Amino acid sequence: MVYRTHTCGELREGHVGKTVKLCGWIQKTRLHGGLCFIDLRDRYGVTQVTLDTNKHPEIKDLKRESVIAITGKVLKKPEANAKLNTGTIEVQAEELTTLSKADILPIDLDDSTNTNEDMRLKYRYLDLRKDNLKNNIILRSKITQAARRFLDKEDFLEIETPILARSTPEGARDFLVPSRRVAGDFFALPQSPQLFKQILMVGGMDKYFQVARCFRDEDLRADRQLEFTQIDMEMSFVEQEQILDVNERMVQYVFKEVLNKNIKVPFPRLTYATAMEKYGSDKPDLRFGLELKNVTDLLKKSDFAMFKDAKYINAFSVEAEFSRGQIDALTKFTQENKAKGLVWLKITDKVEGSVVKHLDEKIQNELKKLFKGTVFIIADEKRTAQEALGNLRKKIAKDLNLIKKDDFVFAWILDFPLFEWSDEEQRFMSMHHPFTNVHPEDVELLKKGDLGNVRSIAHDLALNGSEVAGGSVRIHDAELQRLIFKTLGLTEAQAENKFGFLLNAFKYGVPPHGGIAYGLDRLVAIMANVDSIREVIPFPRNKQGANPFDGSPNQVDEDQLNELHIKVKK
């Protein structure tokens, strides 16, 4: 039996007069005399079908979203429906087969209806029928396939790496899988294929990629899930510039193929220090201006206590006026971002504001050269001031509609610190991961223990204020790798226990290598112009990490636990 000869998005005037078979879901019915007009939908589109209710009275009993098959003749519509790609034709049905009856729907399938998210996730199979979500999933597939085509042409090998692996906790928590065969032993689900792809380079595979599933037991938010997908890459015998080049060309190819957008390369390159100073973020949104300026040296000359005592002062201006209430709300926003407070000035041909009395004429004249309009100033610890004002920059740009939403603006962020201080751990930790190579100019600083000033050969790719990819040139020298482990507080025994397989592989010839990994979910969300990655994942989890669709996570019976040598504490 042939269910269909065409899809519901396929028929055009050239098919007029032909007998066709269509299958799909009843999106809408309209009764008019002895005729029933049916909007029949499948993944590909909607076709209008007309049916004689006297010949097929059963159509009156079928609810929305019932699945039917029809056979009929294609006719030209007297008046075209411009809203449909198939709008110049209709199908006059001669045969009707009910394939599956639908009950009353628990959620509305209209995209304009704001349905509770947990209800959408519980009935995800219905939610997936909506145009917006369906189109996002189609877009995701096209992006993945375009990336595959490009990488294949560049001689990359698509290689799968293990899902059950060794636990090497460093950063986010692992998801652990108990071993049934060895009591007390566990596998870990991979947070990334990092070590395996480096071993592949040791094995001579030269160029690797994988559309990899990864798992991290961390708190959820709009751009984070417990399980996620990476487009993961690694290359041998390359320096950083070659990695950036191939990725720029891949991004250019994918955007042209999928969105028909021309992306200009090379992308701007910013050091981490410059990005933080100018934009208050290591993933800056460059679709608008409002650059931050370091005014520490200038304003510390004032007699305003907050300025005099501050370690760092930065500011930006916007040509707009704000009410007292708006200023108060922005002050609260910066305090929520850990800043002590927010100072503002108004600069035209003169400088106005509550702190002007603390600024002498020379300072005011310098401020007039730097800023125009309303000026926002934060004085605090350096990182706090940068990040808080960077977040304020983004908020004001959004509030004032300064962001060009149809633009895609990329930038490479380079020269990241190799280490960052953790107040919680009271020690330096890897900013990216412990396999990132040291900037060649900073090797001596590493050996001297000046960890706060050691840079890495890392590269993150920012797009519209989000990090969409991150990578680095890797360490390929066993002694340097051991030094990094030691610097991070691992004893030789601990390093051997956790990473001995890597160090052992390094004894037998390691090529210089490096790579990158894209957060596919985040990239698709930006390309689809949606705020949450849950809108581009077929079966996402809610904010509690649960999946209302299948009820996971769930309890298991005692026999399963005993088999895995597990006793649950209550």
Image (cartoon, grey):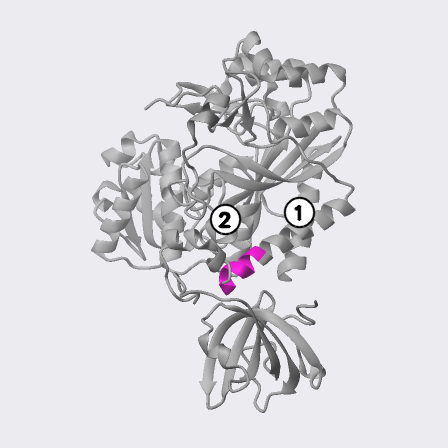
Q: Secondary structure at mark 1?
A: helix
Residue 35 or residue 309, whichever sits in front: 35
Residue 37 or residue 97, whichever sits in front: 97
Look at the image and tell me whether residue 303 can be seen: no
Residue 163 or residue 396, whichever sits in front: 163
Which residue lies under the disc numbered 1?
Answer: 248
The kind of residue on which mark 2 rests is Phe
Task: Kindly report the distance in space between the C-alpha atoms of the residues bearing marks 1 and 2.
Answer: 30 Å
Which residue lies under the disc numbered 2?
Answer: 539
Membership of 134 in magenta stretch: yes
Residue 416: give x, y in percent of width and height. Answer: 54, 31
Callout 1: 10 Å neighbours few (<14), some, many (20+)? Answer: some
**Residue 43: quadrant of the picture:** bottom right
The kind of residue on which mark 1 rests is Glu
Residue 95: give x, y in percent of width and height. Answer: 61, 79
* Bounds of the magenta segment: 130-137
